Amino acid sequence: MPQCPNCKKDVFFAERVTSLGKDWHRPCLKCEKCHKTLSPGSHAEHEGKPYCNNPCYGAMFGPKGFGRGGTESHSYK
């Protein structure tokens, strides 16, 4: 029986969602940064971890200047 990568418990067929090549419990498939529940196929991945496309993945790993003028749109050095 497959184990959920988040909670490490067994994932039964009726509660399984598949994403990033792994089987998850639906509530365990969350954005690594903001913890929003994600649906399979509608999110981004970085180093094997799921992120919501907007704003988390774009702000963290996208090109500089991403955003709508807020604090996430600039990088300060």
Image (tube, rainbow, N blue to C red):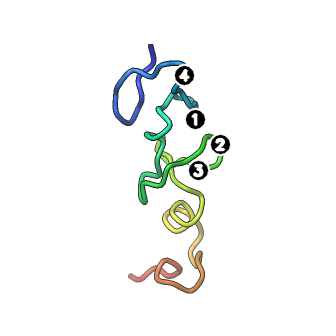
- Look at mark 3 in the image and give the residue it sits on: 44
Q: How many marks?
A: 4
Q: Earlier in the sequence, mark 3 or mark 1?
A: 1
Q: Residues within 10 Å of mark 2 (few under 14, many from 20)?
A: few
Q: Nearer the viewer, mark 3 or mark 2?
A: 2
The CA span between labels 2 and 4 is 19 Å
Contact? badges 2 and 1 (CB < 8 Å)? yes
Residue 73 at x, y percent in the picture: 53, 80
Q: Badge 3, how many Cα within 10 Å: few under 14, some, many 20+?
A: some
The structure residue drawn at horizontal position 56% and vertical position 86%, both measured from the top left corner, is 69
Nearer-N-terminus badge (4/1):
4
Residue type for callout 3: Ala
**C-beta proximity under 8 Å, tags 3 and 1:** no
The residue that label 4 is drawn on is 14
Spatial separation of the CA atoms under disc 4 and disc 1: 15 Å
Q: Which residue is mark 1?
A: 19
Whether residue 75 is situated above or below residue 13 in the rendered picture: below
Foreground disc of the pair 2, 4? 4
